[in-house]
Image (spheres, rainbow, N blue to C red):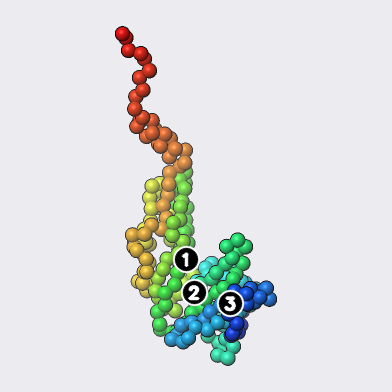
Amino acid sequence: MEDTKLIAKKRDLEGSSNARRMRNAGALPGVLYGADKEPLSIEVGAHEFGLILHHHASESLIIEIELEGEGDMSVLVKEVQHHPVTSDLIHVDFQRVVAGQAMSMDIQLELVGEAEGVKAGGTLDQVMHSIGVECLPKDVVEAIEIDVSDLGIGGNLHVSDLGIDSKFKLLVDESSIVCTIAGPKAETEDDEEGASAAGEPEVITEKPAE
């Protein structure tokens, strides 16, 4: 699906009450910054922006907007705020894209393949769902696929194991754990019970002879 160009209007009114009225009217408040320009308060259609997000795997993506008084431009969806209970969109930050100028962003990590440890009854736990990188606008991707097929029980993958392309400058510790596979729950509980029993002192109940 080709995204519909998002129309952005400048706004003068600030404050939570005004933002609430905007959302009730179907508009989403936001901020546009970057390219050595002053931050600008804007609004976009909440429904239209929601449709764009719905058709992408990640919220960190570059889209085209038509800004009132400035025309068309490319922007990076830098941060999207959702209501903690309803998950409704409540605010969005956009960063102006400058060709040839590196920008920092979070790229989603997508695990693919069925891990050997999962086949053996283990549980896959994805600790890191996105990774902070710096890259040029032309190199931006929505997600990086990580093959976990060879990961066994007790195994884990660190950032250093991912083989991230050199066009991405990592902004996270390479020793950070991305995912791990724990053993079957029943087996783990038996091991814990066995260890607990082994550590208990012997109790002598027989009364010594007088």
Q: Is residue 104 visible?
A: yes
Q: Which residue is mark 2?
A: 78
Of labels 2 and 3, the one closer to you:
3
Left or right: 148 with respect to 49?
Answer: left
Mark 2 secondary-structure assignment: strand
Label 3 and label 1: CA atoms lie apart by 32 Å
The quarter of the image holding the C terminus is: top left
Label 2 and label 3: CA atoms lie apart by 21 Å
Mark 1 secondary-structure assignment: strand
Q: Locate residue 174, reporting x and y percent.
A: 34, 63
The quarter of the image holding the N terminus is: bottom right
Q: Which quadrant would residue 128 be assigned to in this image?
A: bottom left
Of labels 2 and 1, the one closer to you:
2
Q: Earlier in the sequence, mark 2 or mark 3?
A: 3
Residue at point 38%, 57% (across, down): 177
Which of the numbered marks, if any, corresponds to residue 15? Answer: 3
Tell me which amino acid carries mark 2. Answer: Lys
Residue at point 52%, 76% (across, down): 93
Which of the numbered marks, if any, corresponds to residue 108? Answer: 1
Q: Which quadrant would residue 2 be assigned to in this image?
A: bottom right
Left or right: 44 with respect to 107?
Answer: right
Q: Earlier in the sequence, mark 3 or mark 1?
A: 3
Q: Say above or below: 80 vs 11.
A: above
Asked if disc 2 and disc 1 are in contact, CB closer than 8 Å, the reply is no
Q: Earlier in the sequence, mark 2 or mark 1?
A: 2
Left or right: 191 with respect to 43?
Answer: left
Tell me which amino acid carries mark 1. Answer: Gln
Q: Locate residue 127, reporting x and y percent.
A: 44, 56
